[in-house]
Amino acid sequence: MTTLNPAVLMSPSPSRPNRRVMVVAWLMAVWMLATAAAFAYVGKYGRNVPSWDDWDIVPTMTGSQSVTWHWLWSQHNEHRVPVARLVMLAVYRIWPDFRAGMIFNVALMSVMTAALMICIARQRGTFRWTDAFFPLVTLHLGQGLNFMWGWQIEFFTSTAFVLGWLLLVTTSRSLTRERLLAVLVLSLLLAGSGAHGLALLPAITGWLVGDAIIARRRNDLPAGPRHALLKLTVAFISVALIAVYMMGWEKVPHHPGSPGLSSSAITAVKAVTMSFGSAVKPAWPISGIVVISLVIMTLGRLVKILRRDPAERVRAWGMFCVIGGLLSLALALGLGRDGFEARYVTLLFPLLCAIYAVWTIYPPLRWPQAIPVTLLICSAAAFFPNARSGIYYARDVRAHLAAFEKDLHAGKSTPSLIAHHYRYLHPQHALLADYLPMLQSAGIQPYTNLQKDFSTVEQTVPIEDLTITGATRVGTTLQHDGHASIDLTLPAMTRVIGVKMTYSFSNPIHRQPIILIKWRKDGQTFDGQKREYRYFPTGDRDNWERGSYTRTSNPLPAVECYIDDDISHLQIVPDYVPGSFTIEKLVLMVAPP
């Protein structure tokens, strides 16, 4: 009987390709195809049109506003994003096209995905076919909303820093001075990446303090007590960054508050479930049970490593903190947000990457590949449904932004462009009126086609002509209970280009009013989203009161609404919070005879 030499069986030959080469080829193919699909998605559906928050970079991008520390550090809604603003500014100065931000987003995730696969393979000693999980979960089109939105550089840079933290933890069995410096840099970057980056700093602090305690107990201080002091110093800086971030911070007036602890916890679980992408939404609550079960098993696995393997305590504790930090981020998102918000996929898929890393570095004796295979199957099953949802969203956005570009090329006036397309551009009409000419003056295509010459006649409306309901009027000041309305009936059907209203206000909670303007023809009602405009503070904190950068020095707040339609009735709802509201001046912009 002939005995086969195992070495001969395992050696590469023309009839038996090297298994490792096949695995690497498989992983490269999945990574390249996922990257190509994301780039193709952006190339096909992305438009060179800023949308919503994108407009806030326009003044500095075009040189109309100076780049100052005040601008970098000022709030954008609830976020402080100096890092993202600098990255966006660099990208758009190099290539002044709003698709450049989209391409950057895809490229950054592709690079981080490759880094994850290489790092995990090095820690394990080899690549495995299940590592295809990474490109399937980081590059799927379920986060197409973020890929197609240049401003989401804010999310992608923050996520890249979280993945960088995971890579640092994965390769750290001890925290040397060089690694502590890297942790300090990551803390600074996360603090400058918005509230979602700030939410992870307590976990980083816990990692450093826990590491100091672990090293102390095993009497393993590489440089004596000074090294422990250095760890605690970096931990203190991480905590101090939270305090610095919150100095002068203000709640966004129109953002909802927490619905309660239980509701917030359920919303947090939904957010965690969305780490697989929007495709899991129809599978709720089963999808939530699966993801939470994975989290609980992973934390249990890390606890076992912490108790039984002293040599791995530093790394295991670091992974525990990474997962804990991402869970705290999910809980923060649950405080007044929709857990199934597609934007948050990008912020939370690092949780799945951390779970995969734990089970591939610390595999159990029985069924060592069970969790990695499960994650791969789930991400693969969600990949094409995620693509469908992403393409559905992209087609809708592309159609509306392409319609804007068509009207822009056709020479329609700025008020007409704003009136008919603002829902996909920006909710502030005044901001669009101010910033569109900035793009034209900077010579950025296609905005050089902007039609600036349009004529209107401004008609000041006497306050006596207004009909007040639900409020007590004293001169031009209304004392209202939050249900008031101000009605104006025009003497005849009139082509109204827009409305300007300068006002002052006072309410018990000292927040900017949310103003609703409605219009209609005879025989119509005021119901219907297409015949109303809701004004609310958004974007850069400096613009909340005045609406845009160019109006920050105006003595009083004003609302500007473009209608560009024939109307006979106008209605203004001054606010939904009881208080006083003074109409300083109300002007109709009408077409000339």
Image: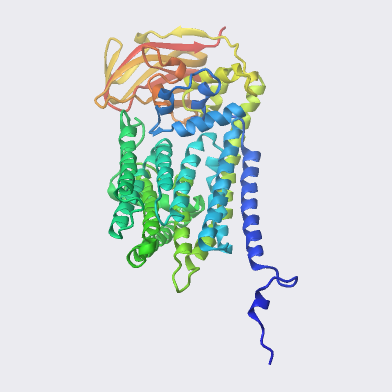
Color style of the picture:
rainbow
Q: Answer whether residue 113 is visible to the viewer in this image.
A: yes
- Residue 245 placement (x, y as % from top left): 34, 33
Residue pushed farthest bottom?
1
10 is higher (above) or lower (below) than 413: below
Callout count: 0
Q: With 397 as the anchor, is 248 left or right in this view?
A: left
- Residue 400 placement (x, y as % from top left): 59, 33
Residue pushed farthest right?
14
Question: For the point 44% across and 58% down, which residue is it?
Answer: 355
Question: For the point 71% across and 72% down, which residue is it?
Answer: 16
Q: Nearer the viewer, residue 549 or 206?
A: 206
- Residue 316 placement (x, y as % from top left): 39, 59
Q: Nearer the viewer, residue 375 or 419?
A: 375
| Quarter placement of the N terminus | bottom right
Q: Nearer the viewer, residue 487 or 274?
A: 274
| Quarter placement of the C terminus | top right
Q: Nearer the viewer, residue 166 or 436?
A: 166
- Residue 543 placement (x, y as % from top left): 41, 22
Question: For the point 65% across and 68% down, which residue is it?
Answer: 19
Q: With 93 as the anchor, is 342 left or right in this view?
A: left
Residue pushed farthest front?
223
Q: Answer whether residue 526 is visible to the viewer in this image.
A: no
Question: For the point 58% across and 62% down, which residue is it?
Answer: 127
576 is higher (above) or lower (below) than 337: above
| Residue 118 falls in image quadrant | bottom right
